[in-house]
Image (cartoon, grey):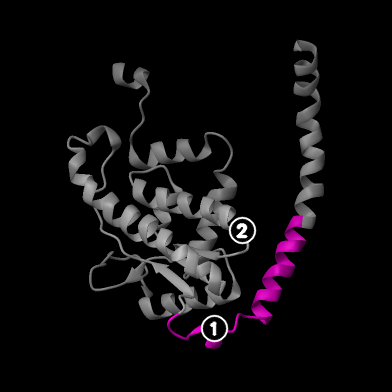
């Protein structure tokens, strides 16, 4: 067994480097064709806007808590309402009851969530919702489409004032989400710079330790005991 493991340890790294471009090129070409098809041919929603059948479900409810580090959670009961509202209320329970109706109408689930759910910060609720619906998309297969608006960008509302950060229009954001759902997109981004930021983060920081190193420097939570002793 040890001989086989040693052979695999030596053979697989160069083999992966050879196979990666061979696999990625057809995949990128396939994704490009799908993207062009979705731009040209959008889903006709006019025939589906008929009551009483349920043809779409939008999960958008949510409350915001004070962002903290996990070690600063002195009272977990304060975050019970956040999880009850954002996950169990908006996502799990509503989706559970809507799935049978959406299967009959070949409908779609639209999830509006925070981009912070991609990063290992204190936005646990956002990460849970993203992971839940990504897993649900695999489970449901082609019977129900799921569009996740994880990165709608910084949207201008009555409650959001982010200083000098560019804020997008809530109306334009809603239009982009609807267009993306009609095209069958699995992810929707409203502001172009947010999409480019995601590509940069996923590409440059995806190697092991890259995202972790960056986050530690950004949030100043380095836990190197050597520095503590200095």
Is 31 included in the stretch rendered in magenta?
A: yes
Residue 77 image point, x, y percent: 18, 41
Residue 7 in the image: above or below residue 43? above
Magenta-highlighted residues: 27-52
Q: Is residue 230 visible?
A: no
Tell me the distance, in whole angstroms, between the alpha carbons under discs 2 and 1.
Answer: 21 Å
Image disc number at residue 45: 1
Looking at the image, which residue sits at the far top?
2
Quadrant where the C terminus sits is top left
Q: Which quadrant of the view contains residue 220?
A: top left
| Lateral position of residue 99 relative to residue 73, left or right | right
Q: Which mark is residue 154?
A: none
Q: Which mark is drawn over residue 141?
A: 2
Q: Is residue 146 above or below residue 168?
A: above
Q: Are marks 2 and 1 in contact (CB under 8 Å)?
A: no
Question: Within the image, what quadrant is residue 38 found in?
Answer: bottom right
User: In the image, is residue 186 part of the stretch drawn in magenta?
Assistant: no
Q: Nearer the viewer, residue 217 or 45?
A: 45
| Label 1: element kind | loop
The residue that appears at 17% across and 37% down in the rendered structure is 75
As drawn, 87 above or below 11: below
Q: Residue at x 41, y 53 (%)?
A: 129
Dot 2 alpha-carbon crowd within 10 angstroms: few under 14, some 14 to 19, many 20 or more: few
- Counting from the top left corner in percent of width and height, residue 192 is at 51, 68
Residue at 42 percent of width and 58 percent of height = 96
What is the quadrant of the N terminus in the image?
Answer: top right
Number of numbered labels in the structure image: 2
Question: In the rendered view, does 101 fall on the left or right side of 18?
Answer: left
Question: Which residue is more in the foreground, 146 or 197?
Answer: 146
């Amino acid at each position: 067994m040890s001989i086989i493991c040693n052979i695999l340890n030596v053979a697989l790294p160069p083999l992966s480097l050879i196979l990666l471009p061979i696999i990625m090129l057809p995949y990128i070409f396939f994704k490009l064709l799908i993207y062009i098809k979705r731009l040209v041919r959008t889903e006709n929603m006019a025939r589906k806007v008929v009551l009483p059948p349920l043809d779409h479900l939008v999960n958008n409810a949510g409350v915001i808590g004070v962002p903290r580090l996990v070690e600063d959670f002195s009272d977990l009961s304060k975050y019970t309402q956040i999880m009850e509202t954002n996950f169990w209320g908006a996502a799990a329970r509503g989706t559970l009851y809507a799935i049978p109706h959406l299967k009959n109408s070949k409908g779609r689930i639209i999830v509006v969530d925070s981009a912070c759910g991609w990063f290992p910060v204190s936005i646990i609720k956002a990460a849970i919702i993203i992971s839940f619906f990504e897993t649900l998309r695999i489970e449901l297969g082609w019977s129900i489409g799921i569009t996740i608006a994880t990165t709608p960008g910084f949207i201008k509302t009555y409650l959001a004032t982010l200083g000098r950060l560019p804020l997008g229009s809530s109306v334009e954001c809603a239009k982009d989400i609807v267009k993306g759902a009609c095209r069958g997109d699995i992810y929707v981004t409203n502001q172009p710079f947010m999409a480019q930021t995601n590509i940069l983060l996923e590409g440059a920081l995806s190697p092991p330790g890259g995202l972790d190193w960056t986050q530690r420097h950004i949030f100043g939570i380095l836990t190197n005991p050597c520095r503590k002793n200095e």
